[in-house]
Image (tube, rainbow, N blue to C red):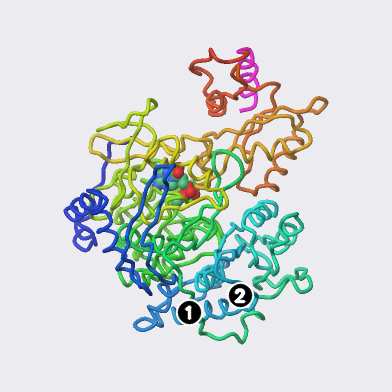
Amino acid sequence: MTQKSFPIAAEFIAAANTSPEQYSKEYQQSIESPDANANFWAQRAELIDWIKKPTKIRDVSYDVNDFRIKWFEDGELNLSVNCLDRHLKDNPYKPAIIWEGDHPSLHKIISFKELHAAVCRLGNALRKRGVEKGDRVTLYLPMIPEAMIAMLACARIGAVHSVVFGGFSAESLGNRLIDSQSKIVITADEGVRGNKHTPLKANVDRALDMDGTESVTNVIVVHRTGNSVPMSGRRDVWYHSLVDGESVHCEPEVMNAEDPLFLLYTSGSTGKPKGVVHTTGGYLTYALSTFRDVFDIKDNDVYWCTADVGWITGHTYATYAPLANGTTTLMFEGVPEYPTWARIGHIIDKHSVTVLYTAPTAIRAMMKEGDAFVRESDRSSLRLLGSVGEPINPEAWDWYYHVVGDGRCPIVDTWWQTETGGILMAPLPGADHLKPGAAMNPLYGIKPEIIDGDGEILQGAAEGNLLINSSWPGQMRTVYNDHKRFLATYFSDYPGYYFTGDGAQRDEDGHYWITGRVDDVLNVSGHRLGTAEIESSVVAHPATAEAAIVGMPHEIRGTGVCAFVILKSGEEATKSLKTELNRHVRAEIGPIANLDAIYIVDALPKTRSGKIMRRILRSLAAGKYDGLGDLSTLADSSVIVELIDIVKAER
Ligand code: 6R9
């Protein structure tokens, strides 16, 4: 924890949406009692347009034997109406999406009116293809406007979307299709990032060869690059020919507040990725309300969230929250280094971006290339910066603040998760000062607790596991097809609380610092990977007998993936085998699962009961060979000596 703290400039505070007094007063009120909490959210629910206003606000019990999370349960609404129709009267020609293509010569501006029309056309087309309320539609798309259009079109007709990140492999896509039993896949011929093409349609074809994907009746293909892709029979249709001639009016489906809006798969500590289910009314209320508070949003903001729509940040804070609020959202197809590392700054200047929301991994990558690239741009339009995805190290924070933001723009370090639907902690700009690396304060209605190893809730300055002792409208409702896993993962270890899977510190001033995952989830470049998932992929290779995956410090990715592998007898530990293992894992899961280090070993450190002692492997992977802690439960301590030799020789 650094002791430095940064006040926010007086001019910013004078114009900010939230004052310190307002935050402390409203925060206290919002958590005082369940009734006060319900009142708070009833007021916030006024921010959205309901078809039928809810009268029942909150019904929550975290008791696993009598479990309920229901918000606004008798309310009815349509989310796409909130993002589109309601802005048409006053702001039809305001840009809804500014799309910046991979190549700097490409951009498109789509007004709310145009976006509404595009969403309606696709909504109608999907209905004609037999998509009904509750059906699942998988989106496997690059960062092109059609990705947001398709999400909104699903919301319009009550279909449940499942967006799969375009960087995931055919096999990962196939597994998600099997779990969600989707009717339709919407994809593109190819994706383009940094002038490189990704064969999205070909991946879909391979995914659909997998057993269990027979639920998919149609593949809708956006024409992005125009390179030829195989189109098969009646199953595959071009997006443009499908929507061509469709009406620009599409009757919105009336959705109950608790009807599911989307599934989003995320990695957990065990087993396969789980389908996180978010519902309609609570999610939208929470998204919109936190968006206004955290980003201090004003009518003329040009807001840019760099997250891909394949992640929760791309759902909540690139798509739904800004559009529901009538804010212009910038969508970027490419990567920060193409054509040069100056690109981010150039985009900010080109479109007069006022709020930039990005991830520490991108900040570190740009920082490494030096200040000169950033200084090619003027960035005078910027007024606020945001960070998300992992703890931001103080060096990266400083650079972001002083170089990207020219020391003018507050940084909101936002802590949240796929499961939470929206931000749970951040320094509301104007309401507090900033501490580099701290998520600072809980948002309205959020009651964090820190618990120690003995299960005791700690008061004052403390460090331990982070729990939330309240419910909020945007929280996930279940794991798709696996409610038991939902209860077991989040509500069983600490009865009565939501367990976050993160560790945290609370400092003397009561501010929160997230210390990282306390479970077997790795946070690589701000993206979640389960060690179990990667281990099963490594072991699926014919040459391997056993594997253990741990995280290791990585300069850019934050956490890198380190594999300890035991080969089958007769296999040789060659360099080419290591390359082959890495290729295999990248192909099975996706390039984000890149194995940054592979150690071929004869044995793994195990307890007498056969559990791998990952703590030891984590130390070794980080180059720490002393102070490995209590080794008394190890079945065979000679293993350690061998491991140290191998790691030392290769690091
Ligand atoms: C939104 C998102 C969630 C995990 C979370 C935590 C880490 C996210 C953070 C942060 C420290 C922040 N995390 N934001 N850690 N400071 N500002 O990233 O969701 O992909 O589900 O990841 O990311 O460990 O538990 P998701």
| Frontmost residue, 356 versus 291 | 291
Q: Which mark is residue 126?
A: 2
Report crowding for label 2: few under 14, some 14 to 19, many 20 or more residues within 10 A (C-alpha).
Answer: many
Ligand 1 within 8 Å, label 1 CB: no
Q: Amino acid at mark 1?
A: His
x and y percent of residue 118 in the render? 53, 79
User: Residue most toward the right?
Assistant: 570
Q: Secondary structure at mark 1?
A: helix
| Residue at 62%, 84% in the rendered image | 244
204 sits to left or right of 245:
right
The quadrant the C terminus occupies is top right
Residue 31 lies, with reference to residue 228, above or below; the image says: above
| 490 in the magenta segment | no
| 644 in the magenta segment | yes
Nearest to viewer (mark 2 / mark 1): 2
x and y percent of residue 148 in the render? 52, 68
| Frontmost residue, 471 versus 572 | 471
Residue 615 lies, with reference to residue 260, above or below; the image says: above
- Is residue 112 visible from the viewing direction of this image? yes
x and y percent of residue 530 in the render? 57, 41
Instruction: Write down the residue under mark 1.
Output: 116
Q: Secondary structure at mark 2?
A: helix
- Is residue 391 visible from the viewing direction of this image? no
Q: Which residues are magenta?
A: 637-651
Of pointers 2 and 1, the one earlier in the residue sequence: 1
486 sits to left or right of 245:
left
- Secondary structure mostly seen in the magenta stretch: helix
Figure quadrant of residue 469 = top left
Report crowding for label 1: few under 14, some 14 to 19, many 20 or more residues within 10 A (C-alpha).
Answer: many
Figure quadrant of residue 560 = top right
